[in-house]
Amino acid sequence: MNDRKEIELDITDLAFDGKAVGHIDGKVIFCDGGLPGERVRIKITRTKPRFANARVEEILTRCDDRIDPVCEHDHQCGGCTWQDLKYERQLQCKQEQVAACLKHIGGLDHIEVADIVPAAKQFYYRNKMEFSFHLTEDGESRLGLHRRGHFDDIFDIHHCHLQSEFSNKVVKAVRDFTAEKEIPVYNVHDHSGYLRFLVVREAKRTGQNLINLVTARGELPNKDEFVAMLCEQFPEITTIVHNETGSKANIAVGESETILFGDGSIEEEVCGLRFRIMANSFFQTNSDQAEVLYNIGFDLLKPEVGERLLDLYCGTGTIGIIAASRVAEVVGAELVTDAIRVARENATANNVENISFFEGNVKDLLKQDEFLSGGFDSIIIDPPRAGLHPKALRRMLRLNPGKILYISCNPATFARDAKEIIDQKYSIDSVTPVDMFPHTKHIELVGLFTRTNG
């Protein structure tokens, strides 16, 4: 097997990262393209002792679950992995992947995986999209999304079906303006240039919109013209901000921010409360499904009026503020300074007085007496994809809470952490996957750990 060989392969499964899976002589083959039940002709692109990577050159036999994607960019975009797969089958695959992670990573095949909760909206559901600037070898300026499998190749997006038509029009307007004004585009290889990202945030329930232009360090050329163009073409824009960064990391986060129009924030409604969102704030990307996810979590947790609740990785305070009316007191912890500031503002705006927020790394806060004073009856954790830091996990378990509600965006790290939690005298009966991101590989889930008497 080598990188020049073309062979036929039967696709049997979909991997956790969205790739199609087949087997040849006991070796796992991960393919870009192909669906379970299909026979394909592939070209091997890389080989390792236990697996190989390949791309599908031709589909020889189509499966019954294959459909025609609605998006013109489906063949090249790295965003929607499964738009050519029936939605019902997408849900089934995600549920199976959660079960596989629990079994193979955590050794927890006794945990029931409840039926995955489907999304009411399968398109135009995202409230945030990040678009990248790119300069081709021919000097052509682009603004769009990453070509599948490439961190350094961007194609011009004309119509993305995950956000809104408003967003698509904004991308085109910014692309045309920056190209016309010949504003230099950032190069991810030599780190020259200026324009890096365009981020569009839409509050689906309030109709407010935030435009964030992320650049390298320096004054924005044609700043006044840029703002005037956007405000004239899109009167529905609430605020425009400019974020500057000197970091070489290819992420759309600024180190300093200038408000160009409006007050620099928008507001979204979840569970009957209103939350402020800024350019660099974390907020669940699907507003409708976030409400579904939180309600499932609270139904599991069953918080009681007299309890003290600890909200770890609280972000801008959404979960803790929603929970505050159900308990005696909430304490939130978050590393990001701006997020803590906005969390406090959100609590004030919603007249929530029984919540306090601490800024710092969770693993460090969990050993500070001031933070831990009074103890906690229940803990809610919603960590990043990497899951809980080992020290944070150990220190959290030393608090000996009666209940731990774990919200996860990564079934693999959830399974890893779940094993450790269960080993420390906790039990969990089931987890519930929630499909926050139709047509993509991403999976959200929620589960409740209860302290045993053993």
Image (cartoon, helix red, strand yellow):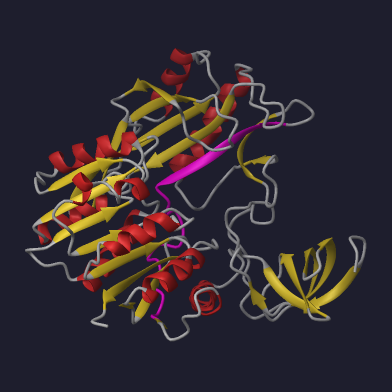
The percent position of residue 143, horizontal first and vertical second, equals 60, 34
Q: Residue at x 34, y 29 (%)?
A: 239
| Left or right of 11, for residue 82 | left
| Left or right of 241, for residue 35 | right
Instruction: Specify whether residue 15 is painted magenta.
Output: no
Instruction: Specify whether residue 119 is painted magenta.
Output: yes
Q: Residue at x 36, y 38 (%)?
A: 336
The percent position of residue 346, horizontal first and vertical second, equals 20, 41
Residue 41 position (above or below residue 391): below
Q: Quadrant of residue 37?
A: bottom right
Q: Residue at x 51, y 61 (%)?
A: 442
Tell how many labels: 0
Q: Quadrant of residue 158?
A: top right
Tell me the chief SS of the magenta region: loop
| Left or right of 1, for residue 312 | left
Residue 289 position (above or below residue 153): below
- Assign the C terminus to one quadrant of the image: bottom left
Regarding residue 19, the answer to whether it shows in the image is yes
**Residue interval drawn in magenta:** 113-135
Q: Residue at x 12, y 54 (%)?
A: 329
Viewer-proximal residue among 61 and 14 = 14
The percent position of residue 352, horizontal first and vertical second, equals 11, 46
Q: Quadrant of residue 112?
A: bottom left
